Image (cartoon, rainbow, N blue to C red):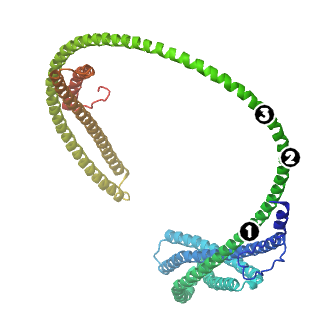
Amino acid sequence: MGKTQIEEIRAKPFIFLPAGMEDHAVCDNTVGSPEVEINYLNQRVQSNESGMQELESYLKVLTKLDLDLAYSSEKLANLHVPLIYLLAQQNDLEAMATVNNYILADFIEKVLVFNFLSSILDSEVRELDNFMDALQAGIIDARKKISSCRHLGKLYSIMEGKLNDSEESLKQSQDQISELKMQSERFQRTVLAFAHENWKTDIAMDLSENAQQANKNAKSNLKMPRQQRHNLWMLEKSLSRELYLEKKLTESRQNEEELKLKLHHTEQVAFHMEEAAEVVWGRFLEAENAAEVLQGISKELLGRLQLIHFNLNGSIQRESELKFKLQASLEELKAKDTALQKLKNVHEENIKKDVELSALREKVVFLEKQLKESELQLKSANSTNESSQEKLGEMERLVESLKENIFTTEVKAESAELKVAELTGTNVELTEEMSFLKGSASNTEKRRTHNRIKFMMDMAMQLAIERERIQKQVHVLMMDKKLLVEKLWNTKKDATECNNEDNIHGSYDRVDEPSEEAPECDTDAGASSSASSMVSEPETSRECQLCICLTRKEPFLFDEL
């Protein structure tokens, strides 16, 4: 690739169109360089980024308004619960005031509670009213900001509708707050009426007003679910619009990312093209220099080749003479090697025969010893088998006796539980009697009842302690039972292993040529049988201790085991 071809590639224009601009493209070879197109794309991406940031800020404002409206409507719905309770409390107080034979302490307590709850309701209503004022200011500010986005068309209409819906819901909530304010003022008036001396006359005056207000409250309570439904419908509508706006946002972000990728791709292509041209031109110059250097080197190599060719002819003649001498010496060596090999073979055969003779003698001696050991192991295995069967019978008897003891302890525990239930019943009766006798009984009767209750409580505590002790004994017996069952299984396994070993020894006696591993297995079997016999002696003593503890009904300690 020459210098002229590289200049032709640089002269050709590189046209790159972004997504959505193919229809507006003009097929003309006189378009500017890629730098102009890159600048155009950069300007477009920057404008898109600024527009996206504005849209995101507007959407954040709208979502914040929706969330604040939802919070206010939910708080209003929650405030209706204490309002209903306060209305009921007010009716009760008025009813008590009309009756002459009321208790003054109860009346004062109810008035104080009513005052406390009405003040809490008043503070909550004021806080909500301030929050609504702030929301109204936020809606006005958002409308001013969105008015600058009229060029967006459909998006602007959606945001405008969302603002209108939020204004409607705000008006409804403000109406509800005004009703709550009026009601809280009436509550404060009732509290003030009960505070001074002529409160009975004031209550008589307010009774007619409260009757009218009750009708109004009933109507407002009927309107509440409709208003809540309307608020929920408005919220759903705003959420659907918000989702639509978020989709539009994501689409515009994707378009922006695609434009950035394409711009980056064009920059990389232009950069790589320039680098490729520079590399090719450098390689072309290096190739010319290398050609001149190689011509001088080739002349020197030709002179050296002629000298090497002359030396080769002389070395070939010497090599032919040395080969002839080598062949003669190799033939002599082969004859000597064959004679040595024959001598080695004869010597090895003699050694093998001596080794086989010594091995046969050792085998005969070893087999005689094996026969004697197998006879002794057979006798010991038979004796251990008989003793293990006797132990199995004793263990089964012991397990049956343990089962009977466990049954008796369970019966005792059930009877103790019944006694505890009876004592708790009597305790409840005594407490009822004590509460009944509080007003009339004297100090001596109180002391007697107190002593009786104390005695009954002590009895209940003793029964509970006895029950815990019985449960612990049952748990200990269950653990002992598990240990005995495990020991039974181990003894059964040892007996089966001994029987298997007896069968193996019988098969060894029948075979004429036993293997070398047989005596090791027999010795292991003998060791296991002796170990089982050694373990069985302390186990019988422990079983005796268990039986003695069960008959005496004493707690058995695990440390003794």
Q: Nearer the viewer, residue 86 or 429?
A: 86
Which corner quadrant holds the N terminus?
A: bottom right
Query: Upstream in the sequence, badge 2 or badge 1?
Result: 1
Residue drawn at (62%, 85%) of the image: 172
Residue 417: x and y in percent read 25, 47
- Residue carrying label 3: 306
Categorize mark 3 by other alpha carbons within 10 Å: few (<14), some (14-19), many (20+). few
Between residue 209 and residue 516, name the one nearer to us: 516
Residue at the spot x=70%, y=25% of the render? 315
- Is the residue under label 2 in contact with that under label 3 (CB below 8 Å)? no
Q: Position of residue 84 (x, y in %)?
A: 52, 78
Q: Quote the CA–CA distance across marks 3 and 1.
A: 67 Å
Residue at 50% x, 80% y: name it.
Answer: 91
Residue 292 is marked as 2
Give the amino acid type for the residue marked by disc 1 in the picture: Lys
Q: Is residue 197 left or right of residue 260?
A: left
Q: Secondary structure at mark 1?
A: helix
Cα–Cα gap, marks 3 and 2: 23 Å
Camera-side mark, 2 or 1:
2
Q: Is residue 289 above or below residue 134?
A: above
Residue 33, x across and y down, in percent? 84, 71
